[in-house]
Structures are given as structure tokens and as C-alpha cells.
Image (cartoon, coloured by chain):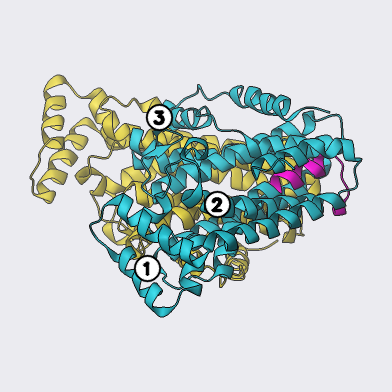
Chain colours: A yellow, B cyan
Amino acid sequence: MYTFKELQNIIEDNLSKIDLDISPIELYEPIKYTLSAGGKRVRPTLTLAACNLFSEDIEKSIKPALALEVFHNFTLLHDDIMDKAELRRNSATVHEKWNENIAILSGDAMSIKAYELLSDTEENHLKSVLKIFNKMAIQICEGQQFDMNFEEKNDVSEDEYLEMIKLKTSVLLATSLKIGAIVGGANENDAQNLYDFGLNLGLAFQLQDDFLDVYGDVNTFGKKIGGDIIANKKTFMLIKALEIADIETKLKINEILNLKEFDKNFKIKSIVDIYNKLEISYLAKNKMDYFYKKALNSFDLVNVEASKKEILFNFASNLMNRNN
Amino acid sequence: MYTFKELQNIIEDNLSKIDLDISPIELYEPIKYTLSAGGKRVRPTLTLAACNLFSEDIEKSIKPALALEVFHNFTLLHDDIMDKAELRRNSATVHEKWNENIAILSGDAMSIKAYELLSDTEENHLKSVLKIFNKMAIQICEGQQFDMNFEEKNDVSEDEYLEMIKLKTSVLLATSLKIGAIVGGANENDAQNLYDFGLNLGLAFQLQDDFLDVYGDVNTFGKKIGGDIIANKKTFMLIKALEIADIETKLKINEILNLKEFDKNFKIKSIVDIYNKLEISYLAKNKMDYFYKKALNSFDLVNVEASKKEILFNFASNLMNRNN
């Protein structure tokens, strides 16, 4: 068994070995820049960890794991263009550092690089891995489209929101685990249970992210508090508040959202006061709990001895800031 | 044996069967729009024709053929964003009809759709087909990057130009043929000779396109004459003229290229006069001939009875406007 840290190092090491010092540099330099920007390499590490549940030979899971990491970074690169984001992991985004055409094309090349890495999956698993990967890839596009649609939509329901975050973020975690399991030799049941574990953990995690934007500790959250509120982002918190508020409170929320000029702290405080009154934090925690437990239930069903499961169990509880 | 027209119809028919009436429509409608915009479906038809050289069962080549067509249309869609093109096949481009974000994302989804189709390649050929496809896909990105670089570069050499058009357009024709051959059961030699046939035919065709922009018949060319000249496009004609002209003529060319305001017909006539004086048409025809003959030589080497080769031979000679 490898520790999570050891698996992370294997990913980092292999990622840095992808040769990108090739011509035309205008195409490959932004890819190198993107892939060397760090991050916790969570997804490919999960692939290795899932493989390691079923096999000591994790070598065979490295290429598909890298494919997942490269594809993930491709989606971030293109999302950043669409969102006009200026920063990613505290560095200039590709379209800011170079230009939009470079960002579109180097993103395209990155997605193909992901398929190049994926094509090195062992032949007996190639077809199924490719199909699972494709399904995930198209779902991420769908999720991004729903997310963009929601910017213009004022009546996003909780179900629609959960579906969107499932597509946009959870299926990637789920697929990373499932592909690792498959190349590790898992049977279909175990692979699917790991998928469900990742899917529900991803939902819980995204809901936690929404929660921490409001109630997080600025020192540990790593992002500014209230960013979603300032941007009128339709998070679980806001959607739920609009759903359960009385007419008067609803009008008040919409009034705040529609302010063209505002003091940021005032806007954040006004919305948080409403969330407090409506006890949104309670609903959010409940929902997080629901998905976290669902995740653990699926994980429990994976037919592997308990000691082997510790790494992924600890990963999940760390992710959810839990010590149980 | 199927006729070229029959194969085209099979492609058109199967292309229209791809279900794109799905949610979110904002993502899939632009894909449907792009794929139903027509075109001659040359590449996937070549895949079927190449398969048909080796097998009467062309069914197995349909999915990879569609993958190539969908991927081709994806590259056009993203290229159109980068080139700020307003029209494609006489209809508004996706980023004009919708917006740039929609064009980026639906393009991404199209490239994944291409891989979905490709994943239905028969399992015994999947790995090799996937690898050949990936290589082509990344080369097309490289070609597009070189093409963008050339806009800013004033000393593009003939070799650099030929390498660019090889990557940007020829490898796709070559790969379409090679993949068809492989799934049809061809041996490596025959598959590679078909690849070389497509590669050199593609080069000859692109050079012909450059030539016809200057010397074509407006009624048969299908584009406006002189478009490349007005846009200062670095075609074979211009690169060659700048290479062989004396200093005085070179200055004259650059003077015309640098005109900020000009009468279009005057600009075209001035450049064409110089091309005439330098006998660029002769050089261009020579080069076309060179690649066309190279293409036919490779095709000759394909070990299939002559009668079966007629369809692809006729395709090539029609493409090059020849009746021999």
C-alpha cells in the first residue's frame, strides 16, 4: 500500500516528465505553464489510490490518472476564458498571460494530450475506460453549460443546482476512482461503488465550498469570504434562501442582488444576516451530511479489507474537515 | 464496391442520426447546426472508400469515419473563433450566431463527441486507430498554431509553409484514408501507402487552392478571387514571389501589402501583375504536379486490384481538376 502523499508524489513526478518543450512553443508553453501551476493533484491521486485497493501494481494506472489530471486542467483553462477569470491558483490565467486564441488552441491541444495519455491504458481495459472517460468529459461540458445558463436564470431549483454541480465537478472525482478501480482489476460492483462514493463525496464537498464561502474561516478556507455573495453566484445557500424566504425577505434579497453600487462588506453582511435568520447553514450542513453519508455507505460496500480502505477514508474525512 | 456518391450518402445518413436533441440545448444546438451545414463529407467518405478497398463490410468503418467528420467540424468551429470569421459555408459562424463562450464550449463538446464515435471502433483495431487519430488531432492544432504565427512572421519559407499546410489540412485526409484501411483489414504497408497518398494529395490540393485564389474562374472556384491577396495571406504564391523577386520588386510587394487604404481591385491587379512577371503560376503548377504525382505513386503501391482503385483514383483526379 502507498500513502496518499506517496501517490501524490508519483503523479507530480510523472506529470513533470511529459515532454512539452516542443514546437510550436506558442502552443506548448501555455500547457506546460498550466500543468506546472501546482494544485493538490487530487483526481489522479484518487485514480492511483483506487487502483491500489485492488492491485499492488499501480504503474498501470499512472497514464489514465495523468489523462484525468490533464483533462481537468484543460477544462479549467477553457472555463477561465468563459468566466473571464484573471487568476488561477494565484497566477495569471492563460488568456490573460498570452491571449484568448492561444488559450483556446492550447486548451484544445491539452484535451487531445489527455486522450494520448489515455490511449496508453492497458489494451484489455482500453475500451471500457475510454467510454467512461468520454461520458465524464461530455458531462463536464454539460455542467459548465448549465452553470452559464444559471447566470441568466432567476429560478434555479435545488435539484437543478445539484444536477449542475454533479456534472461540473462530481463526475470527475467519481470517474477518477472508477477508472483506477477498473485498471486495478476491480469487478463491476466495486468499481461502481467507488464511482458512487466519489460522486456523493463531490456533492458534499461542493456544498461545503458554498457553505464556507459564507461561514468559513478566512485563514483556512484559502479564498476570500463572501466572494459568491458579491458575485450573486447561485449557490446552494442563495437558492435555498430564495426558496424558503417569505415574500418580504425574498424582495429584500433581490433588492440586494440588484444593487449596482454597493459596499462589499455591507452586501455580504446583509445577505449573511438573512441566511442566519433563515437558518440556511443548518439546511446546508444537513445536505452535506446527507451526501457524505451516502458516499461512505457506497464506500463501505467496496469489497476490500478494511485496512486497505483507510487511505481513501482518511482522504474523505479530511476533505470534509472531519476528524471522525 | 460502393460508388463515391453512395458512400457520401451513407455518411450523410448516419451523421443525421446522431441524436443532438438533448439537454442542455444551448450546448447541443450549435453542434447540430454545425453538423447539418453540409459540405462534401470528403474525409469520412474517404474512410469508407479506403475500407471498401479491403472489405465489402464497410459498416465497421462508419463510426470512425463519423468521428473524423465531427472532429474536422470541431476544428473549423474553433478556427472560426480564432480567425474572427463571420461566415462558414455561407451561414453565420457559431460565435456570430450565438456567442464566443457557446462556440468554445460546444466545440469542446464536439471534440469529445468525436472520441465517443471513435470509441465504437472494433476492439481489435481500437488502440491503433486511437493512436493514429490522436497524432493527427495534435498535428492539426500545431498546424493552426503555425498558421497563426505566420500572420506575424514576414520571412516564412516554402518549407515552413508546406509543413504548416501538411499539419493543418493534409494529415486529416491522410488519416481518414489510413483509418479506413486499418479497420478494413489492410496490412501496414497498404495503410501507410494510403496515408502517403492522402498526405501528398492534400498538399497538392492546398497549393491548387492558393493558385485558384489568383488564377481561378470565379464561377467554378466557389470563393471570391483575390481573397488571399486582399488579406495579405502568406500563400505559396506570395512566399514564392518574395523569395525569387529582385530587391526592387520585393519592396514593391511590401509596399502594396502595407497599404492601409486601397481599392481592392487595384491591390489584386498589382500583385497579380507581379506574379505574372515572376511566373509564379508556373512554379505553383510545378509544385502541385510534384505532390500529385507523389500521391499517385503511393496509391499505385497499394496492393489491391486496379478495378477497386478506380473510385479513389477518380476522386483524386476530380479534386485536382484533371481528366486524365
For the residues labelled 3 and 1, the Cα–Cα distance comes to: 46 Å
What number is the disc on residue B26? 3
Q: Secondary structure at mark 2?
A: helix
Circle 2: is it few (<14), some (14-19), or many (20+) Cα within 10 Å?
many
Do the residues under discs 3 and 2 have CB atoms within 8 angstroms? no
Do the residues under discs 3 and 1 have CB atoms within 8 angstroms? no
State the residue position of label 2.
A111
For the point 60% across and 33% down, which residue is it?
Answer: B40
Percent position of residue A165, x then y: 43, 37
**Magenta-span inclusion, residue B216:** no
Number of dots carrying numbers: 3
Q: Which corner quadrant of the image does residue A163 belong to?
A: top left
Question: In this orientation, which residue lies closer to the viewer: B270 or A312?
Answer: B270
Return the disc, 3 or 1, that comes first in the chain's sequence. 3
For the residues labelled 1 and 2, the Cα–Cα distance comes to: 41 Å
- Can you tell which of label 1 and label 2 is closer to the viewer? 1
Question: In this orientation, which residue lies closer to the viewer: A172 or B3?
Answer: B3
State the residue position of label 1.
B253
Query: What chain does badge 1 belong to?
Result: B
Three-letter amino acid code at disc 2?
Ser
- Residues marked 1 and 2, same chain: no
Percent position of residue A101, x then y: 40, 55
Compared across the picture, whether A315 is left or right of B24 comes to right
Q: Is residue B291 visible?
A: yes
Stretch in magenta: B175-189
Quadrant of the frame with the N terminus of chain B: top right
For the residues labelled 3 and 2, the Cα–Cα distance comes to: 21 Å
Q: Secondary structure at mark 1?
A: helix
